[in-house]
Image (tube, grey):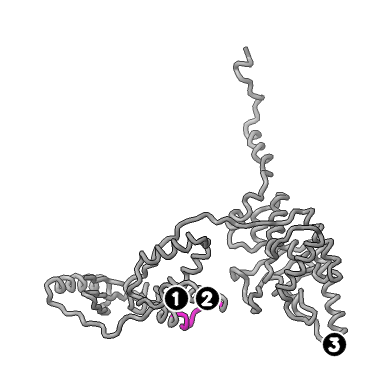
């Protein structure tokens, strides 16, 4: 037997009494919390004495998949990429396990076992959190729709496992080797792309979505406003704009690139592309062709193969190893917090603050200490 009082919707000041008795359930809108609690106590007493009958629900609860599909179809303030990720994780992970089960039959222990098994299989905690997010949304919707009384995922914590970030950057000498060969490969076509990645730490999607109007050549700054993923231009990863500084050499290189694009447009009788790193046809460049170009340049330079994202790591590690301000590096990278920067690059930050620690002696400048044994 279960009789509960719940505010619905939250923050409204309106309270309901929910009854779940012998497989039958019923809900009733009461009003204020005090009255609702009084009604709940009377109902409990009548149920015990057998003086109250609860109507049986004719229709069974929907399955998890049915409930999820309805939730997804509702209007939400999501980015399109968020909706796609939710649908992907539900189809790949949740539906095969919970899809055919009734929403009211899935318990908290089921999810505890499910998520623990995902972690045991080797999925990272962040990946499991992405899988959990839409499932939690489905159950929150089920609670609001009065299909269930409580969300079994509330306060369900994932087993903590420290995330190991794989960072394989190039060192300064290797960067110089790469760029020298980038100047030669395809007559230097991809040199500006690689230089910008290595001098700003922009993500590949941010490079692709960079427009000429985002660049202030006088201030030597780039406004990072958008990203490109799966052929679609969206906001940045955390939906925040940021201004990234450009080195003098990068500034001049991009000026030359703009001049080249103007000449190319004039040659083929078309408008200058709005995209900084446009393809030869003036469209957003393809990630795979850039990746192949990077691999070719690395091979020609006699360097190990790295991912495109490691160009971003290279920017960060070189700056940090040079003793640059961690807060500024974090901001330029567009990290959501400086903690993220420390989590990823902590072991790349050298002990360059020793002189600052040594300066503590200046707080109380006394004569050098002499051990008493040496004074005898």
Disc 3 to disc 2, C-alpha distance: 43 Å
Circle nearer the viewer, 1 or 3: 1
Residue behind mark 3: 269
Q: Neighbour class for label 1 at 10 Å: few (<14), some, many (≥20)?
A: some
Q: Taking 345 as reference, is 61 above or below it?
A: below
Residue 316 at x, y percent in the picture: 69, 57
Residue behind mark 1: 95
Q: Neighbour class for label 2 at 10 Å: few (<14), some, many (≥20)?
A: some
Residue 120 at x, y percent in the picture: 47, 59
Residue behind mark 2: 88
In magenta segment, residue 76: yes
Magenta residues? 71-79
Residue 258 at x, y percent in the picture: 82, 74
Circle nearer the viewer, 3 or 2: 2
Q: Nearer the viewer, residue 318 or 92?
A: 92
In magenta segment, residue 100: no
| Lower position in the chain sequence, tag 1 or tag 2 | 2
Which corner quadrant holds the N terminus? Answer: bottom left
Place residue 267 in its image quadrant.
bottom right
Residue furthest top in the image: 376
**In terms of secondary structure, where does tag 3 sit?**
loop
Q: Taking 267 as reference, is 137 above or below it?
A: above
Disc 1 to disc 3, C-alpha distance: 52 Å
Circle nearer the viewer, 1 or 2: 1
């Amino acid at each position: 037997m279960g009789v509960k009082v719940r505010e619905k919707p939250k923050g409204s000041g309106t309270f309901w009494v929910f009854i779940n008795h012998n497989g039958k359930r019923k809900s009733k809108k009461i009003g204020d919390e005090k009255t609702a609690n009084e009604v709940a106590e009377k109902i409990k007493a009548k149920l015990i004495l057998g003086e109250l009958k609860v109507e049986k629900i004719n229709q069974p609860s929907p399955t998890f998949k049915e409930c999820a599909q309805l939730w997804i179809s509702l209007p939400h303030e999501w980015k399109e990429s968020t909706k796609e990720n939710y649908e992907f994780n539900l189809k790949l992970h949740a539906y095969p396990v919970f899809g055919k089960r009734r929403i009211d039959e899935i318990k908290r222990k089921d999810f505890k076992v499910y998520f623990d098994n995902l972690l045991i299989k080797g999925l990272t905690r962040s990946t499991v959190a992405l899988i959990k997010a839409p499932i939690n949304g489905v159950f929150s919707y089920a609670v609001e729709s009065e299909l269930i009384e409580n969300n079994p995922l509330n306060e369900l914590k994932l087993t903590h496992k420290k995330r190991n970030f794989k960072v394989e950057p190039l060192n300064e000498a290797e960067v110089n080797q790469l760029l020298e060969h980038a100047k030669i490969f395809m007559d230097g076509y991809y040199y500006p792309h690689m230089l910008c990645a290595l001098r700003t730490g922009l993500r590949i999607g941010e490079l692709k979505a960079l427009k000429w109007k985002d660049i202030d050549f006088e201030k030597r700054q780039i406004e990072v406003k958008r990203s490109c993923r799966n052929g679609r231009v969206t906001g940045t990863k955390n939906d925040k704009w940021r201004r990234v500084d450009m080195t003098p050499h990068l500034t001049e290189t991009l000026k030359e690139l703009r001049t080249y694009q103007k000449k190319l447009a004039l040659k083929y009788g078309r408008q200058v592309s709005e995209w900084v790193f446009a393809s030869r046809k003036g469209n957003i460049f393809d990630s795979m062709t850039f990746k192949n170009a990077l691999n070719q340049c690395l091979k020609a330079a006699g360097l190990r193969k790295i991912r495109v994202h490691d160009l971003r790591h290279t920017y960060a590690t070189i700056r940090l190893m040079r003793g640059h301000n961690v807060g500024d590096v974090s901001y330029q990278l567009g990290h959501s917090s400086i903690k993220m920067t420390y989590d990823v690059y902590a072991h790349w930050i050298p002990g360059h603050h020793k002189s600052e620690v040594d300066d503590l002696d200046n707080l109380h400048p006394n004569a050098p200490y002499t051990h008493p044994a040496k004074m005898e």
